[in-house]
Amino acid sequence: MSGNMPQLMTANATITVGSIVMSDPNSGNDNMVIPATANAKPVGIAQNGSRQAPIPSVIDSPPIAALQNEELNVFTIGCTCQALAAGTIVAGNDLKSNGTNGGVIACVETTSFGKEWSVGQAVENATSGSWFRMIVAPRQLYN
């Protein structure tokens, strides 16, 4: 894995662009990914391109990167990529899944923080529904 070269993987569910993906624990295939659930160990960020032609009447919001059994590119550790914010993001925030379709939100430290999986760190500020740059660096956070 080097630079910004995404890894080719296979979707085992519908995956939206710029969302967090995780390995599918039920597939038996290391290369199968699904949208990340809350506090799941992430693999990376799904490709930024949609599987659909850019025709307004056929574009989902957010756009779909891949359907089940389709291939998609996943930005993995060390990549800088664009992600789609599902909440307010501040540059420097550690990022995690909101548990809904792998939406990207900030990790919020609280007294009950415990351990939490982060997919990486924001490089730019963003509001919900906007694109922002991030560095993919999956790790577990502790309070």
Image: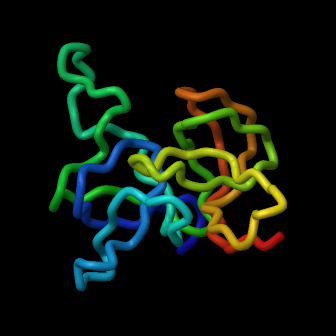
Q: Quadrant of the C terminus?
A: bottom right
Chosen colour scheme: rainbow
In the displayed structure, does residue 65 sit left or right of residue 131? left
Residue 142 or 65: which is nearer the viewer? Answer: 142
**25 displayed left or right of 66:** right
Which residue corresponds to the image point at 57% horizontal and 49% vertical from the top-left? 81
Residue beneath the point at 57% across and 32% down: 131
Q: Is residue 66 above or below residue 114?
A: above
Where residue 40 appears, as percent x and y from the top left, is 51, 68
Judged from this view, the residue extending furthest toward the left is: 69
The residue shown at (24%, 40%) is 51
Residue at the extreme front = 112
Residue 76, given in percent of the width and then of the height, sits at 52, 66
Q: 111 or 23: nearer the eye?
A: 111
Q: Residue at x 33, y 66 (%)?
A: 33
Locate residue 79, reporting x and y percent: 60, 60
55 shown above or below 31? above
Q: Residue farthest to the top? A: 56
Relative side of 99 to 73, left or right: right
The image quadrant that residue 50 belongs to is: top left
On the image, which quarter does residue 34 sit in? bottom left
State whether residue 108 is above or below residue 53.
below
At which x and y percent is residue 7? 41, 66
